[in-house]
Image (tube, rainbow, N blue to C red):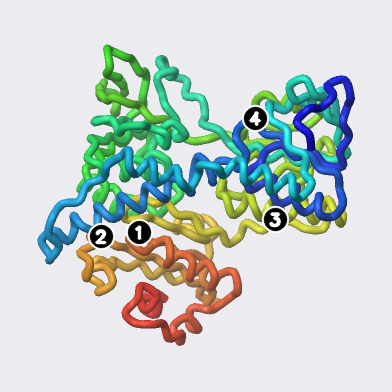
Amino acid sequence: MSSKRRVDVVMEYDLIVIGSGSAGSVAATKCARAGWKVAMIDNRPYGGTCALRGCDPKKVLVGAAEIISDAGRMSDKGIAGHPHIIWSDLMSFKETFTAGFPEEKEEGLKRSEVDTFHGTASFVSKDEIQVGEEKLKGKKYLIATGAKPSTLPIAGNEHLIYSDDFLELESLPERLLFIGGGYISFEFAHIAARCGAEVHIIHRGKQPLDYFEEEQVEALVRESEKAGVKVHLQTEVTSIAKEGEIYIVKGLQQGIEKFYEGNVVVHGAGRVPATEGLNLDAAGIEYSSRGIHVNEFLQSHSNSNVYAAGDVAATEGMPLTPLAGKDSHIVASNLLEGNHKKPDYEVVPTVAFTIPKIASVGLTTKELYKKGIKADIRDVNMTDWYTYKRRNEGEARGKVIVAKDTNLILGAHFMSHHADEMINYFAMAMQFGIKADDLKKMTFAYPTPASDIGYLV
């Protein structure tokens, strides 16, 4: 479509999608291919968080950090020399995965006959939306704006940088402070530490990464400390001040005032649904701090012509890219064929790409006890197992929860260098109802991490 549009004409569409990431793209393309007239709006480069500012570029940096970690652990086991990361070269390599992607994404949408708009979308009525000087009218809407960093109510929060900024640093500072003990802080902290930076994570709770199993997180914290990541727990940040080129973070650790100095302070204290600026009230769309209120079909409770998918929707799903994509498939089917598909968040593996990694799927131990389910828990310290010892990998732990009555796997949890792949085997077994005894019968190639599965169930 031509970039020159008449601003005095209201353009009408069958579907208007707000957001160009995983949660919006599938539905936009499917509906366009079905003959619908579709528009997409984004106020940032096309492609969404994961491809441009999240999972994909982050994992490129993690890959380099893993090489440093591997060499360091084997330095007295036959590997000589000490490789190091040249940050500018690594960032240039990272750019090869993101540069040009927004243009490719937008061209792909246009080939599918989706009209693309750049700017902030703001509802002006139940079925009309403003984008800059242009006004669009839609029969149906899909809101897929994702999430954004939460606002920290502390003095000096204007000094914070965000995950986006970290991934664009031209040089890595000597000292980094991360506020919050979630995925972002731990993953970036492990990267920075392998690059030689002094790194601190300041977390207000007793346990960081609180979605994961407590003893596995404790093991990861020990491994983090060995790598040079200093973790400060039960520390409430109260202010951030700048003195020259140094930032000073003040916190209270169990009533005792603490001070931390760094060249950069990174926000890693959680994200919230990105609803700001959409003017949802004008469209009669109900929402809260959890996101847009939707029914079992991902349809707005209060405006039946509006759907929401991914991180911006108030569902039971975790804020993960694969779920955002699945949500978008479901919305497309419900738009094209009427409401009949519902999201299933029962079996969803999640991984924090630290070094080593930590991963989880299904019920946690706390959830198991809370539900009163009778199960066998196989909790194993795998540190001395061949799989991990052959590369001097340090601590490794695995936990598998199996129902007593059905022999089905209810949950699996890993902290190891192979946690990301191990969790997928167990997620697949859970999804397709493969019993623990049947997993034991499986012959896996040896020696591989998967060949340990028989000892875990």
Q: CA distance from mark 1 to mark 3?
A: 28 Å
Res. 266 image quadrant: top left
Is 451 above or below relative to 7? below
Structural crowding at the residue carrying mark 2, measured as other residues with C-alpha within 10 Å and reported as few (<14), some (14–19) or many (≥20): many
Q: Amino acid at mark 3?
A: Pro
Using the image as rendered, state which of residue 63 and residue 243 is in the foreground.
Answer: 63
The C terminus lies in quadrant:
bottom left
The answer to whether 318 appears left or right of 335 in the picture is left
Sooner in the amino-acid sequence: mark 1 or mark 3: 3
Q: CA distance from mark 1 to mark 2?
A: 8 Å
Q: CA distance from mark 3 to mark 4?
A: 27 Å
Contact check, label 1 and label 2, Cβ < 8 Å? yes
The label on residue 343 is: 3
Q: Amino acid at mark 1?
A: Met
Is 386 above or below relative to 307? below
| Disc 3 versus disc 4: nearer the observer | 4
Q: Secondary structure at mark 3?
A: loop
The label on residue 395 is: 2
Res. 396 image quadrant: bottom left
Structural crowding at the residue carrying mark 3, measured as other residues with C-alpha within 10 Å and reported as few (<14), some (14–19) or many (≥20): some
Sooner in the amino-acid sequence: mark 4 or mark 1: 4
Q: Secondary structure at mark 1?
A: strand
Residue 300 visible to an observer of this rendering: no
Sooner in the amino-acid sequence: mark 2 or mark 4: 4
Residue receiving disc 4: 43
Q: Amino acid at mark 4?
A: Asn
The answer to whether 289 appears left or right of 384 in the picture is right
The answer to whether 447 appears left or right of 51 in the picture is left
The label on residue 415 is: 1
